[in-house]
Image (cartoon, rainbow, N blue to C red):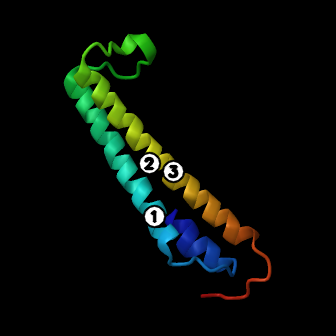
Amino acid sequence: MGLVLVHLLPALGRRIGTGRGVRLQFHLYGWGQLVHALGFFLAGAAGVPRKTTGVDQGLDTLWKKVSMGVVGMGTGLAVLGGVIFVWMALARLLKRGEEDHA
């Protein structure tokens, strides 16, 4: 994200912008990754086996279900930040007639 916004877009003569959307994408992605990792830490502490899905996870207690819910919430935030980044980067790349090299 940083390389595209700081190096690629300016090299192509596109403005990177400094608005709320640019800050929002970094916050959503970064905080989402942090919450995702925290959820996996909590799941591991609760005894949820690694690299398993579905019934094999053994989500038989509330604590295990909540910790995996935290993983999902963090994933959602990070994906939303990534989608905003792709949308904003493509919008700037595909915009015609922009001559500002700021």
Residue receiving disc 2? 77
Residue 29 in which image quadrant? bottom left
Looking at this view, name the residue that lies furthest to the front: 62
Q: Whole-percent x and y of residue 93? A: 71, 69
Task: Identify which residue is drawn at 36% across, 15% down.
Answer: 57
Lower sequence index among marks 2 and 1: 1
Vertical placement of residue 14 versus 52, above or below: below
Tag of residue 81: none
**What mark, if any, has residue 80 been given in the picture?**
3
Residue pictured at 68% horizontal, 71% vertical: 92
Question: Which type of secondary structure does the marked residue at label 3 adopt?
Answer: helix
Amino acid type, residue under disc 2 in the picture: Leu
CA separation in Å, label 2 and label 1: 11 Å
Q: Which of marks 3 and 1 is nearer the N terminus?
A: 1
Distance between the Cα atoms at labels 2 and 3? 5 Å
In the picture, the quarter occupied by the C terminus is bottom right
Pointer 1 residue:
24
Amino acid identity at mark 3: Leu
- Tag 1, which secondary structure? helix
